[in-house]
Amino acid sequence: MPRIGVFVCQCGNNIAATVDTKKVAEEMGKLPGVVYTCDYKFMCSSPGQEMLKQAIKENKLDGLIVSACSPHMHEKTFRKAAEAAGLNPYQCEITNIREQCSWVHHDKTKAAGTVKSIDLTRMTIQRLKKNQPLNKIKIPVKKKAVVIGGGIAGIQAALDIAEGGREVILVEKEPSIGGNMARLSETFPTMDCSQCILTPKMVEAELNERITLYTYSEVEKVDGYIGNFTVTVRRKAKYVDEERCTGCGECIEKCPFKVESAFELGLSKRKVIYTPFPQSVPNVPVIDAPNCTKIQKDKCGACAIVCGPKCIDFKMEDKLETVEAGAIVVATGYQNMPNERFGEYGYGRIKDVISGMQFERLASSSGPTGGEIRRPSDGKVPQSVVFIQCVGSRDEKKGVSYCSKICCMYTAKHTKLYSHKVHGGQSYVFYMDIRSGGKRYEEFVRGAIEHDGAMYLRGRVSRVYEKDGKIMVQGADTLSGSQVEIEADMVVLATAVVSRDGADTLAQRLGIGYDKYKFYNEYHPKLKPVETVTAGIYLAGTCMGPMDIPESVAQGSAAASKVLALFSADEMAREPITSVVNRTTCNACWDCLTACPYTAIEREAIKDRQGNVVRWVAKVNDGVCQGCGVCVAACRSKSIDLKGYTDEQVFAAINAF
Amino acid sequence: MKIRLGNEDIQSASVRRLERITGEDVKRCYQCGNCSGGCPVSYAMEIPPTKVMRFLQLGNIEEVQNANSMWLCVGCLQCYSRCPQGVSVAAILEGMRQETLRKGESRTEVKEVPFPFLKKAPQQAIVCGFRKFVG
């Protein structure tokens, strides 16, 4: 006969107001197997937990029920208390009589609430009687991390993990790390030069002996589970031997062909053998194969002739490398929405309509104009510049419905840069709302208006067109209630922040969730902001949604601290609520395999003594299984059970109702 | 209303002059509307205080000069005491009045005021009235 204890919590008045807890305890005491009952004001308080421990010892209980709030709140608390009193923690079960009972009943006579609490607790008692003691799953952890994306968030995560004494592989798609931040001229609200604060971190990442940079590389495949991932990385052919290259730049100088620079967003040209920008890390050029005449037509080869250390190899091929890692940090960043989508603003048609990122390059001292604001069409200094905010953002019809969050701030920064660089020039900003939430952000925007004389006009621009060599901007100022027309020399569009092309493919490879805009989903928007539904994979930066540099850096560090916590022990303990397959009845239909959202189910071969495969069965990987129970429902032959929620237990609970 | 906005409007000399006279900075106003909300006479103004500030920011001083707002303002400074940015619309309207009066426009001569009215009116009103309409 089991010896079960029932502890009914009053939760102050939260439960006691509509449930007669004393009566619940009394009724439960009448059931066979229940040897101890009580009710108490706050079971989760220290005295409440002490009471529980004492009752277990004094009454030699072998199982207990706490009828209280949702198991999400205090299941862990009570299981720990049970464990401290010498019980298997999984012999402690929670009945939710708060969220599912007292809070939904308003009957002050307590009749309905009490009856339902009695029913629910009785069901849990019957379920508990069928419980098997469970033990936490121990998984070995490989103490190496892979960081995908070498922008500021990824660099920060890699540096912090390396600082914590663990090895990191930083995978970057471009020839250099640095990401979008490397393009920026200055950063708000402090106006310090972006490259001046970024490049030291890039160099630090390069020099750190625990960080290995895989630039010009992409993640091709991810297998395994928390603590034991196998990541396949495609290392694209650079055609330059990274080990031997000294970064002298002779090859770049001698290359006779030029193409549009993607880093400069088409504002200038670069050679076919190139580094994206002067401070590139690593400072090793790559050959842009589709544009190289030597590779395409076997003509030229000037770079190889001048190369001192002879490190150019036109026959180089992509390499696939596999990395064993315990954790993955995804920091793949963002891109801007293509401006071409907004025909009414004339992008592409009118040469002097540019994007915000292009303006960053114009203002950057390492940019195509050396930091002078000159318009692309004729190189003249524009005397009036119109900035248009919310291009694509907050535009459900043509763009995205969310706010891109950073545009208000960077546009204010642009107006400041412009007024500092072009004296007497006038900037106009069309905005819908100024969103400047952040430390010293509001003051920054006010500074742009009051000290640097930016003219803010509240309204969207409806049309941009050319007239007699001038760009006409037609919009509204809803504050004065007038239609406004401005003759501008240049127009800058603050285009929406969107997810990277291919973000969905990577998410599918990793098995992490993403929203309709292909931004990756965090596990919990408030309490687990850098975790994903797949254990061992963490997120940082703008791959999750629009955010600014301080936030991205904070998230990089947050993800790193999660990784370091995971790596702090040799083995990792996991909740044992996982599925288990009955190998004798499994008929290998693989319905479970397709149903599992975590790819936790594998095919297992059953062999005879000679080693011949006799048949196949499904096998659950305890490291990956999250205990959702989808496979249990999908299994036709009833061969899968979820530990802690077996069919036997569930039926016992239903029968008790 | 349709306006054509240029650099000369935003950097308007007459608005800069008004700012110098009154010691106020029109750019400080962020259009919250508190002044219009508290002004005891804003309901009767052709252009309420908030919009006065907006027109000045846009360099459209004529629009404000042609409206009755500055003549209705009694200088109670409700706008100034409530303004989170510390802007005094009253001071700006006072400045505009003084400029207009000194040009000899819209000026009321003391002798034109009917004597019985002067005798009956409270002293405070006479002082204010002289200041406001005589310049």
Image (spheres, coloured by chain):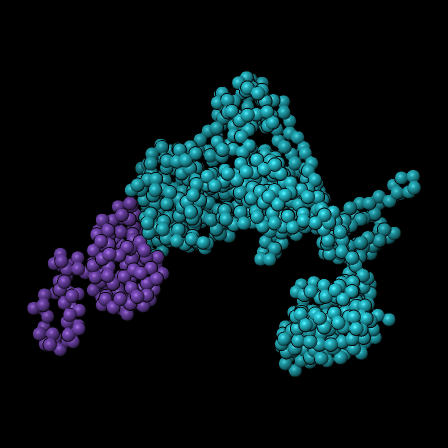
- Which residue sits furthest left? B111
Nearer-the-camera pick, A63 or B44: A63
Where on the picture, by quarter, is residue A330?
Answer: top right
The answer to whether residue A359 shows anywhere in this view is yes
Q: Residue at x 63, y 25 (%)?
A: A316
The residue at the point 76 percent across, 73 percent down is A55
Q: Residue A501's spot in the image, x, y percent?
A: 57, 41
Residue A466 percent across, percent down from the top left = 35, 39
> Quick one: which chain is purple?
B
State the cyan chain: A
Question: What is the quadrant of the C terminus of chain A in the image?
Answer: bottom right
Please give left or right for residue A584 compared with residue A111 in the image: right
Query: Which quarter of the image is occupied by the N terminus of chain A?
Result: bottom right
Q: Is residue A423 left or right of residue B131?
A: right
Closer to us: A569 or B77: A569
Indicate whether A336 appears above or below A23. above
